[in-house]
Structure formats: C-alpha cells, structure tokens
Image: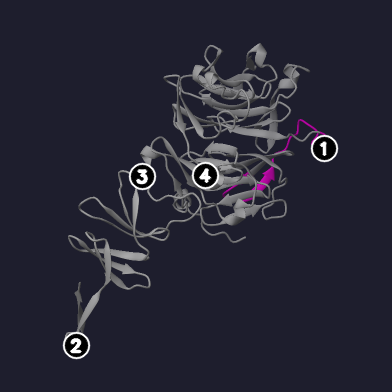
C-alpha cells in the first residue's frame, strides 16, 4: 500500500473553513471532513502522537491526515480482525489499541502491523472479551476493560486477568461493564463501571493491591457514563439518569453539584462532557428543557458552574449531539455525524462575515485610516464593515480582487469583468478608469 507522508494536525486545522461566533466564551467551527468520511457513522475518534485522527466508523477504521482518508477493515491490508470497533486508544509507544466485540487488537503504527492480543486464561472459542475501554498506566502498562466487568492487563502478546467484578460480587450487578481505566494519581489505578461503582487498585512495586469499591447504595446498578479526574483528588462523574456527582477520591464521598442539580442536568437525557484544561469541564446535554444550546462549564477549584448560550449553524439546529471529545488541543463535537470544533474565543481570531451554510471566500481587504474596513467577498461582493458592531453596508455588486488606496478619499479597485474602477469614498460612487496612452514611453498614465 502506498501512503503519502501524513501532514501534522495543523494541516487538518487549516482545512476547516467555516466559523460560527459568539460574543464571548466559545465558538463553533466546522471541521469540514471530506465527503467520503461524512457518509460514515463515526462512533469514536482519537488523535495519535503524530497529530493524525483515527476514527471508528461504520465502515471500519479510518485515518485522516488533513488531506486524505485511509479506510481499514477485515479485507484491507493490514486487515482488522474484527471491524465492529468499540473503542480506540493511542499509547505512548506509537501503538493504536483497538477494542472490538471479539477482543483487543494492537496496531503498530511504525510497522503497520495488526495483531490480536491472546487470552490464554479463557477458552477463546467460548469467551472472547468484548472490550469496552482501554487505558495506560504511568509505567506504560496497557489495561483493557470488558463489557462483562473484567479488567485485563496486556502482558506481552497476551491478556492477564486482574479483576472480575462478577467474581467479587456474584449475581449482584446487572451490567458491570467497565467504562474507563486510568492512573490519574501516581500509584492509583482507577476503574469506573456501569454498576455504579468506582474501583481503586493501588500499585506497589509493580503489583496491584486487592480492589476497593466506592459508591452510594442508591447508585447500585446505575451507569457511570463519564469520569474526569482533577489533580486535587476530586472527580466529576456523569451517572445516567441520576445527574452529575463530585467524587472525592481521598475520602470516598459523593456529592451533587448545586448549580447542576438545580438545572436537573443529567436527570434525564444524555450528558456530554469534555475537559477544557486542568480546572474546567465543559458540559452539554440533550435534555429537552435545556437543549444543546446551553453550555455549562464546571470549575473544580471554585466548585462553580457558569453557563453560556451557544449558537449553532442553521442547518444543524435540529440535529442531536452524538459525541463530544477533547483530543488534546482540539474539542470536537458530532451532530448527527456532522463534526464541529469548539474553540475558546479569547484564544482565537475574532471572526467576521461568518455563515453556517455557505463558503464566504474573501478576495480583498483594506482598512482605511478612519477605521472603515473595505472587503471584497465572494458572497457579499464589495462591502464596508463596522468592526465594532459587525454591521455591513453593500457598496457594489462587483467581485473585487484588489483594493489599492490612491488618495484620501479614492480607492482603485481591481475587479472581475469590470476592469479597473475608481471608488469615491465620499460619494460611494464608481466610475471606469481612464487611460491615456503615451506611445513613445510605451506606458500609460492613470487618470481619475
């Protein structure tokens, strides 16, 4: 297989065309994925150490380098042993781990080889682990959690069983699926489950201690859908149909957050969370009485929640959130498989002339000393803009490719089809450029 040298993610970001702006807080920008990717149902997305996007799709595994897409399935080279992908995880050793309904696959991104990780402790023909999540410890160990509540560690090319929730609590939980695995604090491996339990395994000299289970009795058999740890030892939990809880990993307490409780966030509908930085968690919900137009931001140090009204492109206003993820230096959201990027406005350019449904190519721009901004655009033609208010005034219907200041009140415009035009700023008037040819000098003189 011939593969073009991948671009870094900065190339991916420069291909994103549209911008949707709010006055403050966050804005949306269209990721503008290629058409062959837009037709796929994307269920998971991650970014590897080279900045490339990898996506679990309805058609298998897809890599997007900002220019090209490469699809891998059970018929490609290399072939994915099982195209029913549940989760993706990039490790620090340049491997992509693929969790499938029939086991764990290691994809070596250097050699471009895929291999199933064996499970010698169980009969592969009777029990193939349905992998729900993958994580990496601080020492590089890879862990995988299954749908039926088993925690594994990768040992060479095999899986080693570390924990079986059903063995610890026989017939106690309806659905003990493992949702996440991480080592947020040195020497503490934390596992979240759909049994309503948080599990801690202490790591001492390479060995794991017996598990400690945390949870409230009323949360038994509830589904912990997302977790986000903070350096302070606090952890934000999204528990399906119960709301958002703050779990203190040091003393084992669970508390609801008053502002989110008042808004009934998470009590029904689906919650989507992503960390913005070390201290903040961004929260959306599709709860009917709130809607995806409300963005909640939780601040760990202050235990405070702020709220922002979000604006979506007109063509996506009725679409539902499918997933919302932080990929390291970008926040991506899928709305019925249309992917947007969420950007902090104070970290990005201020945007004018944005539109949610069509490209607005800017052909020329000039800012006069009095502050007036003159723009030649594909959509609006020749206009003047008030930067402070965003108001625009249409000056003419020409496609203006070049704006040259000629005098205090005169601009020389290079247009498509109309040639060179003088524009009188005071009169808002256009007239054709007059040319006086001088044969001996073989040049011409411009005359207004």
Q: Is residue 428 above or below residue 437?
A: above
In the picture of the structure, the residue carrying the numbered disc 3 is 350
Distance from disc 3 to disc 4, alpha carbons, whole Å, reads 18 Å
Observer-nearest of 223 and 371: 371
Question: What colour-coding does the image apply?
Answer: one colour
Task: Read off the magenta span.
Answer: 107-126
- Marks 2,1: beta carbons within 8 A: no
- Secondary structure of the residue carrying tag 4 is strand
Q: Please say whether residue 316 is visible from this viewpoint.
A: yes
Q: Nearer the viewer, mark 2 or mark 1?
A: 2
- The picture places residue 253, in percent across and down from the top left corner, at 55, 12
Observer-nearest of 382 and 194: 382
Disc nearer the start of the sequence (4/1): 1
Q: Taking 26 as reference, is 323 left or right?
A: right
- Secondary structure of the residue carrying tag 2 is loop
Q: Nearer the viewer, mark 4 or mark 1?
A: 4
Q: Residue at x 62, y 60 (%)?
A: 1
- Marks 2,4: beta carbons within 8 A: no
Disc nearer the start of the sequence (2/1): 1
Query: Residue 320's image quarter?
Result: top right
In the picture of the structure, the residue carrying the numbered disc 2 is 439
In the picture of the structure, the residue carrying the numbered disc 1 is 125
In the picture of the structure, the residue carrying the numbered disc 4 is 340
Distance from disc 2 to disc 1, alpha carbons, whole Å, reads 92 Å
Distance from disc 2 to disc 3, alpha carbons, whole Å, reads 50 Å
Q: Residue at x 19, y 74 (%)?
A: 447
Q: Quadrant of the C terminus?
A: bottom left
Distance from disc 4 to disc 1, alpha carbons, whole Å, reads 42 Å
Residue 110 shown in magenta: yes
């Amino acid at each position: 297989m011939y593969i073009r040298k991948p671009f870094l993610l900065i190339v991916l970001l420069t291909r994103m065309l549209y911008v949707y702006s709010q006055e403050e807080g966050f804005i949306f920008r269209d990721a503008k994925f290629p058409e062959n990717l837009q037709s796929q149902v994307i269920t998971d997305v991650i970014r590897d150490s080279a900045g490339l996007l990898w996506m679990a799709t309805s058609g298998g595994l897809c890599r997007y380098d900002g220019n090209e897409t490469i699809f891998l399935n059970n018929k490609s080279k290399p072939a994915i042993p099982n195209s029913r992908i549940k989760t993706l995880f990039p490790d620090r050793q340049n491997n992509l781990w693929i969790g499938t309904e029939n086991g764990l696959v290691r994809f070596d991104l250097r050699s471009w080889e895929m291999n199933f990780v064996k499970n010698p402790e169980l009969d592969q023909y009777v029990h193939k682990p349905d992998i729900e999540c993958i994580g990496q410890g601080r020492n590089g160990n890879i862990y995988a959690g299954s749908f039926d509540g088993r925690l594994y560690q990768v040992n060479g090319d095999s899986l080693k069983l570390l924990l079986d929730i059903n063995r610890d609590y026989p017939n106690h939980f309806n659905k003990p699926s493992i949702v996440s695995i991480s080592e947020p604090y040195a020497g503490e491996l934390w596992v979240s489950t759909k049994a309503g339990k948080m599990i801690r395994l202490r790591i001492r000299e390479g060995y794991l201690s017996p598990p400690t289970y945390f949870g409230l009795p009323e949360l038994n058999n509830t589904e912990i859908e997302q977790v986000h740890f903070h350096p302070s030892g606090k952890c934000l939990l999204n528990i399906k149909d119960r709301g958002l809880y703050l779990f203190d990993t040091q003393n084992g307490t669970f508390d609801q957050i008053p502002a989110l409780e008042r808004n009934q966030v998470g009590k029904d509908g689906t919650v989507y969370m992503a960390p913005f930085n070390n201290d903040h968690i961004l929260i959306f919900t599709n709860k009917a009485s709130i809607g995806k137009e409300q963005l909640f931001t939780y601040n760990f140090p202050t235990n405070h929640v702020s709220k922002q009204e979000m604006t979506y492109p007109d063509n996506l206003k009725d679409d539902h959130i499918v997933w919302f993820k932080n990929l390291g230096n970008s926040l991506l959201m899928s709305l019925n498989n249309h992917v947007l990027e969420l950007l902090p406005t104070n970290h990005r350019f201020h945007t004018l002339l944005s539109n949610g449904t069509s490209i607005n190519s800017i052909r020329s721009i000039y800012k006069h000393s009095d502050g007036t901004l003159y723009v030649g655009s594909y959509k609006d033609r020749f206009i003047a803009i008030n930067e402070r208010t965003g108001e625009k005034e249409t000056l003419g219907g020409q496609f203006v490719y070049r704006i040259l200041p000629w005098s205090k009140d005169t601009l020389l415009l290079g247009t498509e089809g109309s040639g060179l035009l003088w524009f009188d700023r005071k009169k808002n008037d256009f007239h054709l450029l007059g040319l006086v040819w001088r044969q001996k000098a073989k040049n011409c003189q411009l005359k207004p």
